[in-house]
Amino acid sequence: MKRITLGEFEELVLLITASLEGDAYGVTITQEIEKQSGRSVGFNTVHTTLQRLEEKGFIVSEMGGASAERGGRRKRYFTLTAMGIKAIRQVRELREKIWKVLPAKFLGLAGN
């Protein structure tokens, strides 16, 4: 099986998009990344990453309806494709595999 590669921020955006289940658009993704990671993230950075993930086939986007609160503008909603789901599963498997081989001192078990 071919290993899917993602950059750290791509992985974060993909995971957050999956976690938002149907309410994943630029602003909510940006806000959730900031909430979960505790780091400030620019909307343009998220938008560029979403475009790249869509080009790679990990997500698809769909335009929502226009709303008065947004001045008639529509939101672009993002969802994971089968390939995107496969990617986050592979990332999780890899990280779990690595965590299992870490020496105890890195896991907080050796009193450090």
Image: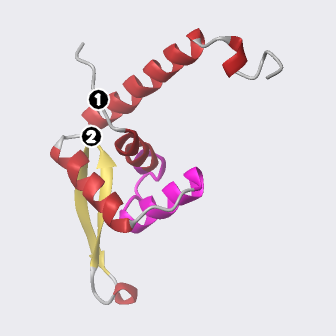
Camera-side residue of 88 and 47: 47
Q: How many marks?
A: 2
Q: Is residue 36 left or right of residue 66?
A: right
| Badge 1 density bin: few <14, some 14–19, many ≥20, Cα 10 Å | few
**Residue beneath disc 2:** 81
Measured along the vertical axis of the image, is residue 76 above or below residue 33?
below
For image coordinates 31% across by 66% down, the residue present is: 44
| Badge 2 density bin: few <14, some 14–19, many ≥20, Cα 10 Å | some
Quadrant position of residue 93: top left
Q: Which mark is residue 5?
A: 1
Residue 54 at x, y = what percent?
Answer: 21, 48
Camera-side residue of 97 and 112: 112
Which quadrant would the N terminus be assigned to in this image?
Answer: top left
Q: Are marks 2 and 1 in contact (CB under 8 Å)?
A: no
Magenta residues (range):
17-38
Q: Secondary structure at mark 1?
A: loop
Camera-side residue of 82 and 55: 55
For image coordinates 67% across by 20% down, the residue present is: 106
For image coordinates 35% across by 85% down, the residue present is: 70
Q: Is residue 42 left or right of residue 61?
A: right
Measured along the vertical axis of the image, is residue 51 above or below residue 110?
below
The amino acid beneath tag 1 is Thr
Q: Is residue 8 left or right of residue 61?
A: right
Q: Secondary structure at mark 2?
A: loop
Q: Is residue 104 magenta?
A: no
Measured along the vertical axis of the image, is residue 93 above or below residue 27?
above
Residue 87 at x, y = what percent?
Answer: 33, 30
Camera-side residue of 72 and 56: 56
Q: Is residue 22 magenta?
A: yes
Residue 52 at x, y = what percent?
Answer: 21, 49
